[in-house]
Image (cartoon, coloured by chain):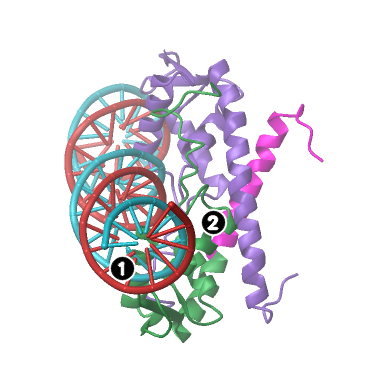
Chain colours: A green, B purple, C cyan, D red
Amino acid sequence: MRHRNRKGCGCFQERQSRWLEPTILFLLWNGWKHGYELMSEIPKFGFVAGPADPGAIYRTLRHLENVGLVTSEWDTSGTGAAKRIYKLSQEGKNHLRLWADSLRNRRDALNSFLTHLDHLFPDIDRA
Amino acid sequence: MRHRNRKGCGCFQERQSRWLEPTILFLLWNGWKHGYELMSEIPKFGFVAGPADPGAIYRTLRHLENVGLVTSEWDTSGTGAAKRIYKLSQEGKNHLRLWADSLRNRRDALNSFLTHLDHLFPDIDRA
DNA sequence: CCTCTATATATGTTTTAAACATATATAAGT
DNA sequence: ACTTATATATGTTTAAAACATATATAGAGG
């Protein structure tokens, strides 16, 4: 038993806000991709432990299309189930810059807070 | 008009998850404080723009007490409204270390993602 | 043929931190 | 008296995330 499990802890739930949208925008930067492809690539960024939630991805893609940040087409070439492929719109590319600013702010806040925390735990070996 | 306002953007809402608990634990590290005090100190960390939400603070304090990470007493000394003062329990101190690990993971993920984003925007001047 | 798995998309539901709003009371300043 | 600052507290809404499930095609293996 590492520590208290659920209800009252949560710090290892790793629930983090608003990382999925920018991650998808980033992955669509270099041309057409479909949801299932994103699903396999998203875990690499380390925002979630374990596999990405397909429900979240498909819903986010639809949302991004509704607000004009991506466009989609059906890809019926090849075998298997039809794929709906997405790419960034110009507005989507611009928007990703805004996301970068926003995420930098987050990181900076986290960094400064972590610096404070480090002062509390001087016994920890930091390479 | 900087960019689309609500419904569809949100990246400047700066809604970030799970920063309040560790922030409060940190502020209570060095002894007794009350909620209103925390309210004035929390904005310094940069997790939120503008004043901290007192509702969130008092509810979080109660929650932290329920799960044993802090303890409280009434401070009726001095003038003005009575203050409920809180301090970290030993378990709270231990728990803050877990938070530090968790937040480091977040920051690392953000950092690596931001590095990817930086490659997309080579025209931006970074000092 | 049948079953199992992988590919692919989609919707339904629940949870919960955050955000927003409001209520209450004391004391100090003007 | 009126307003502001101090101090705590609860009620309600929002929305991302988490969890669950449904559907369909195609390939691999027995």
> Residue D9: percent from the left, percent from the top?
29, 27
Rounded to the nearest angstrom, the CA distance separating label 1 from label 2 is: 27 Å
Name the residue: 64% across, 78% down.
Answer: B121
Examine the image and state in which quarter residue B109 appears.
Answer: bottom right
Membership of A104 in magenta stretch: yes
Residue at the limit of the structure toward the right, as seen here: A127
Q: Are marks 1 and 2 on the same chain?
A: no
Name the main secondary structure of what is drawn in magenta.
Answer: helix
Asked if residue B15 shows in the view, the reply is no
In which chain is the residue bearing label 1? B
Name the residue: 35% across, 77% down.
Answer: A82
In which chain is the residue bearing label 2? A
Question: Mark 2 packing: few (<14 Cα in 10 Å), some, or many (20+)?
Answer: some
Depth order, front residue of B117/C12: C12
| Quadrant in which the C terminus of chain B is drawn | bottom right
> Residue A58: percent from the left, percent from the top?
36, 66
| Residue placed under numbered mark 1 in the picture | B7
Question: For the residue labelled by badge 1, is the local secondary structure a helix, a strand or a loop?
Answer: loop
Q: Which residues are magenta?
A: A102-127
| Residue placed under numbered mark 2 in the picture | A43
Q: Is residue C1 above or below residue A123?
A: below
Membership of A25 in magenta stretch: no
The kind of residue tagged 2 is Pro
Question: Mark 1 packing: few (<14 Cα in 10 Å), some, or many (20+)?
Answer: few
| Quadrant in which the N terminus of chain B is drawn | bottom left
Asked if residue A5 shows in the view, the reply is yes
